[in-house]
Amino acid sequence: MTLTAPRTLTLLPAALLLTAGLQGAGAQAAPANWNGAALSSATFVILDPQIQGNPNAVSAQQRQGVLEAMKRDSAGAIKRRYPNAVIATDPAAPGAVQVKPVLVTPSVLAPWNKLTAQLEFRMPAGNNVILKQDFGVLTLWQKQSEAANYMYDVLAQRLP
């Protein structure tokens, strides 16, 4: 784990977590409510997704479809991970975990480049946790209309 900003924790890919451990200098423990028991019955609000990097790598019509898929499929992935969780629509829902799906695109969508998918969680107590992973452009292209679903399922499997 590495600290990316005050009160913001970045969870690294599982292989790095196993080798990095939690003892490193500057490492900070996950928020107390960042556990399977709390999250499995939490209320989640999916905020408007965001594309960072080169948003012009796709047309405006494609971009709109990607943003819609990010919102829908990130909610679906969380619900599959935590079947008892509630997906709400009101960002002001009391005690809700706010989730912002983010896609960071490379300058060019070449087969050898990578995209980064993120789920940014804002916990009710104000803590932020960012879960992210890189995905190859070619891998996502092969998934076609299921690409966002695939990305967020992979990320959701890394939730506690």
Image (cartoon, helix red, strand yellow):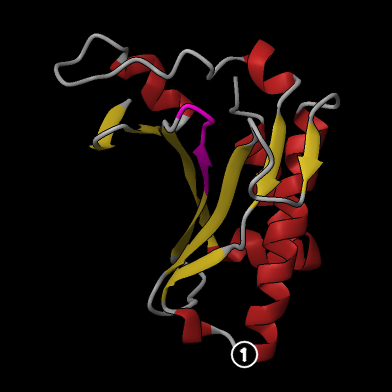
Q: Amino acid at mark 1?
A: Ala
Residue named by callout 1: 60
Quarter of the picture holding the C terminus = top right
Secondary structure beneath disc 1? helix
* Quadrant of the image occupied by residue 119: top right
Q: Is residue 120 magenta?
A: yes
Image location (x, y in percent) of residue 107: 38, 78
What residue is rendered at 43% in x and 66% in y?
113
Residue 119 falls left or right of residue 77: left
Give 117 or 93, whichever is nearer the viewer. 93
In the depicted structure, whether residue 130 falls above or below residue 17: below
Residue 19 falls left or right of residue 74: left
Question: Going by the picture, which residue comes out furthest to the left?
Answer: 25
* Quadrant of the image occupied by residue 36: top right
What residue is rendered at 53% in x and 17% in y?
33
Q: Is residue 109 magenta?
A: no
Image location (x, y in percent) of residue 46: 67, 50
Give 4 or 32, whichever is nearer the viewer. 32
The segment highlighted magenta reads: 119-125
In the depicted structure, whether residue 101 falls above or below residue 99: below
Image location (x, y in percent) of residue 3: 26, 32
